[in-house]
Image: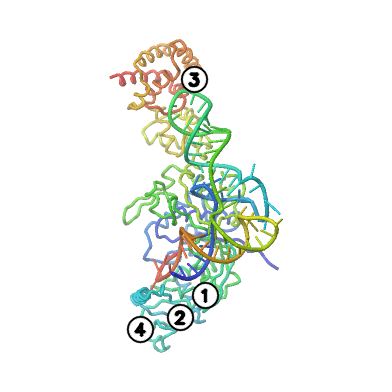
RNA sequence: GGCCCGUUCGUCUAACGGUUAGGACAUCAGGUUCUCAACCUGGUAAUAGGAGUUCGAUUCUCCUACGGGCUACCA
């Protein structure tokens, strides 16, 4: 009789700074898997390192995941049946389990000071015999409850001499486990060292805390970054030593997201260096006051950001590229996550955003544009803005482009691009334009078609190419060579505004 | 250095022993056009190298090279 356990996954960042692309993707994969399996997704904060704690980081994590549309069923933000979800608030729990390990002989007290350890490492390096490892071969030469007489150990403990608790890794044992992404992974315990499980400050390290919490919170699948792969055997040993092997979660170690240029994992500073954000939302470092850009502030839509991220390392096996969150949830599978790291491509991110923006309903783009108009002190009628949207929607890559591609619908140009003027302005241009507007003045019905007909007729009559008239008109109306079709532009502006811009433009350009 | 993981167009990737090695981004060319974009059509472009296994290897095995991760009282 096997009952299928309800899927429970967790995303467990440490609040040591903002969450970057890779972290968001890990959260996303956890979320997609949980939703698809009708399971539970948990947000746990791993703040056992008080040295690296950064003010505001936890709030940042919650806010950015919320912006992305990644929601949690349990966690620091909403509580739940396994609270608390902040590890710093669970220290009593870990104390209990470390005691079990001590009692059973799988862990031991170590009294070596950081300075002593440092010295041993240096000596090792000098001799050139590789890096020092605190393990079966060296632990007897160190100061710990395995090497010292028990009387002395007792004294040290009674005298409150600072200590850490280390795991006692067995000698020469083959540890293997099945990774959902990589298949069988094998490691010999020879290569593991006696990692610290409990620090002298009374808090556990990641290794102990994550195992204890995953067990207590009934986590069924651990989906985390590849940087954890080397310590997975250690975690497995902990499950074994605590007698939890049968309820051990399954592991899936995600490949890393790499720098777009060269190699190495994508890092905080790559964004500044290469000119793209690596964070979902902007972050200001509370100490240095450095500000890091965010996708939200750059004008990305969360759907586009998520879509791009989902496909960075995972693919559906079809040629579909655009996915809503719901589609991702139903298409996702851990088996189709790639094994190798992916270089992040900011160009493709931009393309995704363009796709989403150009498929957005008018109404939503309207809201975005209204905000920007307002921000620029322009009070435009919705009706007019709604006319503008279809004319610019194909032309934008970012939300901020809405304004950059449409400001001239709402206000006359303040300057006229000199490069463009030189290129298109001829000696006869002023006269041509002047003659043309005489005709426009006489128009009864000022609309796109009528204007088009008039222009064709006029240019034929004058024996000039359409561009000879249109380009100067555009310069006068927009101030440069950008923008949608001239007739569309004119129709939205209306006859009066159209003429007024041409008049004042002619004055400014010829003076 | 040791251990672990990886390697298909420039980039993200598909092809789970038999394909003219497919798609997307980028790039290039052409088209459209009143401009700038967008858009449409087409092109260039890849199995890291070497041994095996097999009738047949991108696919399986081994070696080499290269890349990455880990190697803290950090996560």
x and y percentages locating residue A79 in the rendered image: 50, 60
Q: Which mark is residue A137?
A: 2
Which mark is first along the chain, 3 or 2? 2
Which mark is first along the chain, 2 or 1? 2
* Quadrant in the picture for the C terminus of chain A: top left
Quarter occupied by residue A486? top left
x and y percentages locating residue A178 in the rendered image: 59, 66
**Chain identifier of the residue bearing label 3 in the image:** A
Up the image or down, A490 lies above or below A123; here it is above
Up the image or down, A159 lies above or below A475; here it is below
Up the image or down, B29 lies above or below A433; here it is below
Q: In the structure shown, which secondary structural element does the residue marked by tag 1 occupy?
A: helix
* Mark 4 nearby-residue class (10 Å; few <14, some 14–19, many ≥20): few
Could you give the CA–CA distance between mark 4 and mark 3, rounded to whole angstroms? Answer: 91 Å
Q: In the structure shown, which secondary structural element does the residue marked by tag 4 occupy?
A: loop
Residue at horizontal 38%, vertical 53%? Answer: A269
Could you give the CA–CA distance between mark 2 and mark 4, rounded to whole angstroms? Answer: 28 Å
Give whichever of A447, A140 is nearer the camera: A140
The residue that disc 1 covers is A189
Could you give the CA–CA distance between mark 2 and mark 3, rounded to whole angstroms? Answer: 86 Å
The residue that disc 3 covers is A448
The residue that disc 4 covers is A159
**Chain identifier of the residue bearing label 2 in the image:** A
* Mark 1 nearby-residue class (10 Å; few <14, some 14–19, many ≥20): some
Up the image or down, A15 lies above or below A169; here it is above
Give whichever of A422, A255 is nearer the camera: A422
Q: Nearer the viewer, mark 2 or mark 3?
A: 2
* Quadrant in the picture for the N terminus of chain A: bottom right
**Chain identifier of the residue bearing label 1 in the image:** A
Which mark is first along the chain, 3 or 4? 4
The residue at the far left in this view is A511
Quarter occupied by residue A462? top left
């Amino acid at each position: 009789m096997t009952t299928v356990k309800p899927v429970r996954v967790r995303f467990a960042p440490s609040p040591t700074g903002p969450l970057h692309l890779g972290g968001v993707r890990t959260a996303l994969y956890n979320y997609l898997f949980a939703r698809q399996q009708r399971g539970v997704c948990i947000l746990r904060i791993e703040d056992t390192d008080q040295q690296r704690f950064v003010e505001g980081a936890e709030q940042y994590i919650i806010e950015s995941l919320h912006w992305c549309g990644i929601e949690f069923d349990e966690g620091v933000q909403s509580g739940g049946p396994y609270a608390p979800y902040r590890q710093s608030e669970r220290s009593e729990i870990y104390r209990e389990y470390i005691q079990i390990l001590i009692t059973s002989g799988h862990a031991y007290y170590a009294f070596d000071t950081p300075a002593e350890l440092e010295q041993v490492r240096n000596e090792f390096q000098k001799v050139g015999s590789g890096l020092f490892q605190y393990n079966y071969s060296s632990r007897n030469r160190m100061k710990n409850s395995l090497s010292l007489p028990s009387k002395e150990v007792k004294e040290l403990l009674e005298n409150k001499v600072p200590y850490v608790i280390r795991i006692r890794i067995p000698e020469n044992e083959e540890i293997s486990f099945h990774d959902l992404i990589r298949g069988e992974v094998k490691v010999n315990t020879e290569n593991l060292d006696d990692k610290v499980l409990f620090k002298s400050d009374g808090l556990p390290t990641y290794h102990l805390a994550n195992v204890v919490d995953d067990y207590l919170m009934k986590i069924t699948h651990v989906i985390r970054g590849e940087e954890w792969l080397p310590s997975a055997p250690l975690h497995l040993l902990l499950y074994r030593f605590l007698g939890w092997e049968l309820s051990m979660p399954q592991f899936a170690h995600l490949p890393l997201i790499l720098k777009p240029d060269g190699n190495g994992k994508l890092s905080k500073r790559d964004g500044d260096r290469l000119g793209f954000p690596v964070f979902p939302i902007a972050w200001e470092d509370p100490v240095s006051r450095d500000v890091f850009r965010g996708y939200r502030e750059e004008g990305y839509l969360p759907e586009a950001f998520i879509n791009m991220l989902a496909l960075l390392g995972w693919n559906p096996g079809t040629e579909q590229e655009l996915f809503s969150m719901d589609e991702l949830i139903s298409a996702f599978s851990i088996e189709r996550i790639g094994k190798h790291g992916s270089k992040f491509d900011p160009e493709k991110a931009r393309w995704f955003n363009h796709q989403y923006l150009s498929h957005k309903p008018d109404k939503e783009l309207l809201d975005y544009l209204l905000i920007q108009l307002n921000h620029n002190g322009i009070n435009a009628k919705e009706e007019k803005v709604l006319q503008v949207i279809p004319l610019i929607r194909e032309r934008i890559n970012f939300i901020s482009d809405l304004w950059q591609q449409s400001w001239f619908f709402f206000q006359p140009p303040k300057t006229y691009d000199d490069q463009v003027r030189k290129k298109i302005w001829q000696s006869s241009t002023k006269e041509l334009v002047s003659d043309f507007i005489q005709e426009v003045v006489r128009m009864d019905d000022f609309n796109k078609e009528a204007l088009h007909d008039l222009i064709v007729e006029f240019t034929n009559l004058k024996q000039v190419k359409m561009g000879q008239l249109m380009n100067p008109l555009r310069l006068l109306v927009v101030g440069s060579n950008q923008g949608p079709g001239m007739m569309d532009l004119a129709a939205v502006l209306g006859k009066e505004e159209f003429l007024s811009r041409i008049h004042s433009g002619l004055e400014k350009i010829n003076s």
